[in-house]
Image (tube, rainbow, N blue to C red):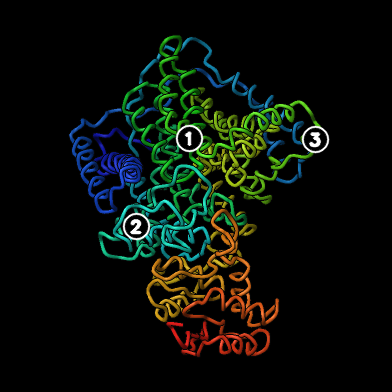
Amino acid sequence: MNRFRRASDRFLSTGVVRWSDRVLDGAVAGLACWTVVFHFARWTGMGRDGALGLWIVAIVAWTVLRLCRPVGQAEWGSATSDPAPDQRWSVAGLAVVALVLVWVDVDGLLWPVLWAVMCILLLAAVRRSLPMTDPTTVGKETARAVPTDAAAVAVLLLAVVMAFLSLVMVRPDQDDVFVVNRSTWIAEHDTSFPERDTIFSDDVLPVQRPAGLPTSLEAFIGSVAALVRVTAATLTYLGLAPLVAALSVLATWRLLRGLGARAPVLATWAGAAFLILDGAEHGSFGNFSAGRSWQGKVVFLMLVVPMLWHHAAALGRTGRRKHLSATVLGVVAGLGLTSTAVLVAPAVVAAATTATAVHATTGRARRARLGCCLVATLPALVVGVGTLLSEPQRLDDSVGALTSGVVAAFDPLRWLDSGTEPIGVVRMVFGDGLGALLAVASALLAWATVGDRSTRLLLLAGPVAVFVGFLAPGVLDVLNEVGEADAIAWRTIWILPIPALVGLMLTQARLVLPGRSPVPSFAVVVAVLLVLALSGTSITSSANRGTRLVWPPAVDLPHPDLDGARGLVDRAPAGGRVAGPEDIDFAVSVLTSRVKSTNPRSSYLRGRHVDGAFRATERRTLSHALEHGWAEWGIDAVADALDGLRPDAVCLRAESPIGDRGEVAKVLVDAGYRPDGTDIVCRYFVRSDPSG
């Protein structure tokens, strides 16, 4: 029986495909629209509620127009019947490269050698995947194929599973000190959006993040939280997170359908299962999925990147305006989610559009498609240039940095002193186990599992952009020196839609045993994932930074430190300051902006917002003493910190691995604090004279 039926024969599956695509495009369009509204509000001083009202009006208008538009009858897919070329040497070579990348530390002078080998193998594969004759299918699309009703239900079930997983996983991430605190501040202040710090001050100190275009997702969450009258933390962790986790499944499924996968539903399940088992590295794709799906960078990676691959590839193949507009919206939405979009979004659009345009068009039509690609990437390019211009001193260094990069490209000795080793970037994301081998092999070899030349070119475009482009010797150093991109340069690997590539690799590759018929794809998927489950670290494992599964669903904050944070907030006046161990201060900053914590994240005790009045050393000293119960730098240093910071309420960690914590408690009493209760987390102290 055929796996696919015509749309007219399957009412349920037709509806699921149509509405899932509409929901995906609508979600990205909504994010893009909010990005524009947010920056318009910043520049005009429009208040929070006015900006949200303007966005709602725009979204209603867009939805009406979208629903009135006729539903398309086709979906882009393979557009050529050229036979697949023999690529056995390229496949064998890239398989060896994958093994080397995973299990050999290829640094120093060895990296340029391996990079040259990758260039030869990947570019040879590209050359042999080009069309054998001039394209004759310009602008055509294949007839819409719709999965069976059971397959559509299976995808929806997977979306529910991932949403549920995001609800019951608790894996606190200190990035939330910035992102969720900003949402909380906006929800609690009916005014214009903040331009400066909201963690330690109320829009007074310089912001912690580098100069550049501010992201808009935090403002959106805060504005909606104020409208529906829930806390920003609740809406973030229990509302946005499961929604994004579910939509990411639909985004991967659509990309796989567009790639012409034989079993897109099974491939989607396989990709999702890989993400769940990919918890060994903090920077892994698995740890940037359901467990952190409320963060803008994860929304970009799991929702926007697959959407860009889908629409940009369709744009290159068909040149249709709807794909151009969807691609532009995806780029703009990405800019509102993460600064990483400045690097990743243009690369994805350029790679996908170029690959399909080269295969489907010639002459003027090809130039028109590439021109559309430039138009789609223009917002990101403008923001990138604007970021450089926002700090003039960067311009003075740009020529020197570029010169340095050029010299590095031709001077092997400079490679030994690389500030960011490409192999380190690979390790940061993929690690070095069997899961890493599957991910890297999928990135380098997924193209070989499909027979269609056009799809092969498209799947080759990603690894060419990453391994030949961004990981070329000297490129990461240039990015670091020109744009101070060292914190996000490793995210250039996000160009690769790894969940979809892993799904393709596991379901498309044929395993043939001697004298037997090919092993069914389902058996291959189950066997490989079982091996990964037994040998790797899942994202739900306690070994993954103390991850816990909880019921009922709870906000992703340290437990039971969350109770200590609430106890501190209850004991402090509005506008006051509290002090406690770092994890408790972290929870305080996420829960409310009306009380300021002393040290919610140690890395934020340095930066351009720090001056003498900030008292960074005193903050660190006090936080350490309250965590460990003893004064490592002396009781006088703790007393000076209390005198300078003057917190209104203090939490001294209740459990006592060393002594009875009497040393710090005595300092607190001598400094004018009195005990105010105890729970399993804290011994609370408040100032005896609040006005003093």
Q: Is residue 114 above or below residue 631?
A: above
Separation of marks 2 and 1 at Cα, in angstroms: 26 Å
* Residue at (47, 64) in percent of width and height: 169
Q: What amino acid type should be assigned to the residue bearing mark 1?
A: Gly
620 or 217, nearer to the observer: 620
Q: Position of residue 282 (x, y in %)?
A: 59, 55
Give the residue furthest to the front. Answer: 692
163 or 38, nearer to the observer: 38
Pointer 2 with pointer 1, Cβ within 8 A: no
136 or 386, nearer to the observer: 386
Q: Report which residue position mark 3 lands on.
A: 109
Mark 3 vs mark 1: which is more N-terminal?
A: 3
Q: Report which residue position mark 1 lands on.
A: 386
Q: Say if residue 99 shows up in the picture.
A: no
Q: Is residue 190 above or below residue 405?
A: below
Q: Position of residue 627 (x, y in %)?
A: 60, 77
Q: Say if residue 663 shows up in the picture.
A: yes
Q: Is residue 161 above or below residue 674?
A: above
Q: Is residue 519 above or below residue 605?
A: above
The local crowd at label 3, few if under 14, some if 14 to 19, many if 20 or more residues have their Cα within 10 Å, is some
Q: Position of residue 256 (x, y in %)?
A: 44, 37
Q: What amino acid type should be assigned to the residue bearing mark 3?
A: Leu
Pointer 3 with pointer 2, Cβ within 8 A: no
Separation of marks 3 and 1 at Cα, in angstroms: 35 Å
Mark 2 vs mark 1: which is more N-terminal?
A: 2
Mark 3 vs mark 2: which is more N-terminal?
A: 3
| Label 2: which secondary element | helix
Q: Report which residue position mark 2 lands on.
A: 222
In the displayed structure, does residue 23 sit left or right of residue 167?
Answer: left
Q: Which mark is residue 565?
A: none
Q: What amino acid type should be assigned to the residue bearing mark 2?
A: Gly
Res 111 → quadrant: top right
